[in-house]
Amino acid sequence: MLVYIVRRLFIAVVLLFIVTAVAFSIFFLVPRIAGASADDLASRYVGKSAGAEQIHQTAVHLGLTDPIWVQYGRFAKGIFVGSNYDTGPSVERCPAPCLGYSFVTQNPVLPDLLKRLPVTMSLAGGAAVLWLLGGVFAGVVSALRRGTVIDRTAMGIALAGVSLPIFFTGLLSLSIFSYALGWTAPGGSYTSITTNPGSWAYDLMLPWITLAFLYAAAYARLTRAGMLETMNEDYIRTARAKGLRESDVVIKHGLRASLTPILTIFGLDLGLLLGGAILTETAYSLPGIGQYALIGLNTNDLPKVLGVTILGATFIIVANLVVDLLYAVVDPRVRTR
Amino acid sequence: MPCTMKRTPRTAALAGVAVVALTLTACGSSSKKASTPSGSATGGATSSGASASGGGGGGSTTTAAFNAGVGKVFNPSTAKGGTLRMAHSGDFDSLDPADTYYGYSWNFIRNYGRTLVVFKSAPGAAGAQLVPDLAETLGVPSDGNKTWTYKIRKGVKFEDGTVITSKDVKYAVERSLDKTVFPDGPTYFNDNLDLQGYTSPYKDTDPNKLGLKAIDTPDDNTIVFHLKAGFSGFDYFAQLPQTIPVPQAKDTGTKYKEHVISSGPYMFASNDLGKKFVLKRNPYYDAATDPDSGRLALPDQISVELNVNAADIDNRLLSGDLDVQIEGTGLGAEAQGKVLSDPKLKANSDSAAIARTWFTVVNSDVAPLNNIDCRKAVQYAADKVGYQRSYGGATGGDIATSLLPPLIPGARKIDLYEAAAMPGGDVAKAKAALTACGQPNGFSTNISYRVERPKEKAVAEELQQSLAKVGIKLTIKPYPQGDYFKLYAGKPDFAKSNGLGLMVYGWGADWPDGYGFLEQIVDSRTIRAAGNTNLGIKLPEVDALLDKAFATTDITAREKIWGDIDQKVMESGEVLPGIWAKGLDYRPPNLTNVFVNDGFGEYDYTTLGTTKT
């Protein structure tokens, strides 16, 4: 197992290197290939009255006049050994891993990301619990009550959940539950869990439910399909023939075997969300990683987007690793290999 | 609004006192609005004379009515307390006074910073009047307007109790000159001070970082500016946020925005960049040192949430969960419909005319539009009602009959192509014009617009339909907004070689002033290789009129010239006017002292109070 973990970690590092190289190329190399000069790129980061000389100074200041490999080398070096940045009156240290600093706000990217990470983790974590519990429960019930009103109702709701975009359900739910009824917190509300766990849960309740509604639908359908297939397996019939209670047959034998694909998709979904739930954070004005990515995109602030890309890739790689390790826990057949 | 307000040395030297100055913060706001001179509140208790707004004319009213906050003070009060709640749909421009160039930011910054002079907080035209703030009086010129002297008021203090001196103002201006550290601020001091090679206090060998020779501080209360050339409008430079004092010892460069040292009535209680900041009262602010600005400083706190969903901001305004949309861009389309259809909500809204025209440039570089009769055919054939519909109908603005918005002094009624009489277009006259230009069956050309702007797309489609009626076939060419001026429509070579005969466009000024509105879009001498805001209007007679206006000190005579320029541009047919824009703002009932300040074209952010505690 240890060798397996080490091997996976090594692959993860290589993957991250590839992700940074590809992302960096997309943001910095492709525009140059398309004919944009360093000054063209820099013109996005100067004031409205900037002249050609100021634009060029900015290009030099941002390092955009250097060859692309020098720029990437500087970026990679920052990740491993840190880098310095000029604040004007002084030079400040950006310690490793330094993901560069914003071309617009001139702040280091990583501290900004880390400040926003608890928001995204709170959003994704809380919603994940809801959608996993709700989706799996609905899927199991639907499978066991196949063809009944319960099955059709649950799958109907699931279909609605998948179909409704979150920027619609988000704003609609805010209008109804926050502004018309006053039951939930208004948009933009977030309290740290360490400050007040009650307020934390209250503020995030609506985003959790909305996000969970979207994801639970897919999980319900996936669980239902898996359960329908599993419950027809020979070993289920054997379990029943041995006289096991139906609840044990469903949970210990049926559900457990159906969980493997659920776990796979859950790992990917959670990893993806931790890298930024852009639509949910935008609809609810939550200051998380997704909102940060959107701000970066809207302002052509490439270091911000690059930082989020790297962070998101890290989460997905780590989540995949954890899921692979959990297979052994969920499915005894994996353990015996 | 396309805003590249780089001024040439020539125009800097020639500009007259007010006209030039009024452009200084052109581009200040993402939506440049200005109120009509007089309000149109219907009914309700009104009074005239001084109000709680801190002075100025316009009167006041306590009865909610449509436009009750335009030209007068709505809900006057001197009651202090509560928290004024504001929100921004994006990130704040910059809290650093050296690095900000948006109107809403300049409007708001007066809460935590005091400039040498300032626009008066008053409704109507009084709001566009400069009054002393940190200085005792307006600037005193000498040496043919090349030297400007200000006396700093005694007893004004920073938030830590330190007395503000002239050296703090000098240092503030010095640091703002460094455009690698503060790239976003305006460059008027860079362009006009006699810098003698000086670039930045951060590269200054003077031990006190005050080596700039263009500014003298003979004593702690006197600051003297030396210009390269005489400039009678320097007071308008002195109102720039760059003159807000900065203590050199507390300057942290790019990080100063995290904690700006206050010199105004409020100071930062917290500042979570990109998320939210809260202002609280500055204990060292003494209203006795601030007799002229009209600031009221009523709320105990001001909170500003950042990066809030724009639709959510509208919802929260209407539900009473929020007080002000700080950008001042008005309600979104959905909320507009809701407000205008509900009399109660409508009574809490203000529709102020904006010093902005949405128009289309008819490119005389592209054949056959190099023929004036072909351009006239476009003018006659265009469906102006369709143009207005593209911007949301009457809510979005009135059908424009010429380029200059009516609220600009000097604007007069000009309607050469029957926009008022035949707003749907005059096919007969258009065909006659086509015959005159040798294209009786029409011709083909392209029309460009900014792809991120659905209203401009709608304009392109409306014009495509209406011009097709006379045989003018338009091919629609969308281009990305970010590069529209640098690479496409604003690059003459590209526009010509790609046959962009029509270019959908719009322009606004910060203040209702002819120079600020016209110079950057009709002066042919501002046209460069790329990045133009003048998309191709090259009329020698217009250039001559602009020069004449720069040299004219008589205000009435100068204002007449703006109308003359408008006439010449319309005669050339090079501008197809669309609509004169309007915006719709909502004022929650708990707000007090609400009025649109003509200096900023937005609600005045230094006088607002709230009844919510």
Image (cartoon, rainbow, N blue to C red):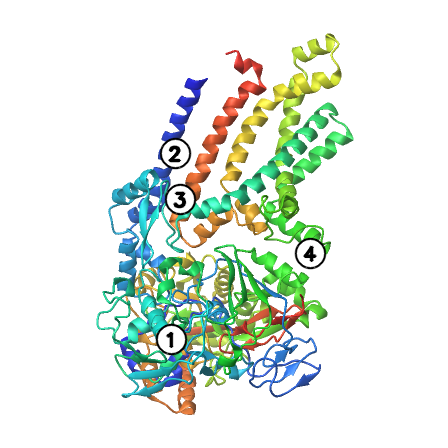
Q: CA distance from mark 1 to mark 2?
A: 53 Å
For image coordinates 52% across by 32% down, the residue present is A268
Amino acid type at image mark 3? Leu
Chain for mark 4? A
Which residue shows up at 63% across the image and 63% down it? B317
Q: Quadrant of residue B330?
A: bottom right
Q: Chain of mark 3?
A: A
Q: Amino acid at mark 1?
A: Thr
Using the numbered discs, state the Cα–Cα distance from disc 2 to disc 4 in whole angstroms. Answer: 43 Å
Kind of element beneath mark 2: helix
Cα distance, mark 3 to mark 1?
A: 44 Å
Secondary structure of residue under mark 3: helix
Closer mark to the observer between disc 4 and disc 1: 1
Cβ atoms at labels 3 and 1 below 8 Å apart: no
Is label 1 in contact with label 2 (beta carbons under 8 Å)?
no
Nearer-the-camera pick, A25 or B392:
A25
* Residue type, numbered disc 2: Leu
Cα separation between marks 2 and 3: 12 Å
Can see residue B437?
Answer: no
Q: Earlier in the sequence, mark 2 or mark 4?
A: 2
Q: State whether residue B576 appears in this view.
A: yes
User: Is label 3 or label 1 in front?
Assistant: 1
Residue ID for mark 2: A16
Mark 2 vs mark 3: which is more N-terminal? 2
Q: Which residue is mark 3?
A: A306
Number of the front mark, 1 or 2: 1
Q: Are marks 4 and 1 on the same chain?
A: no
Discs 2, 4 touching: Cβ within 8 Å: no
Query: Disc 4 and disc 1: Cα gap in Å?
Result: 49 Å
Pinpoint residue B611: horizontal percent, then vertical percent: 67, 70
For disc 1, the chain is B
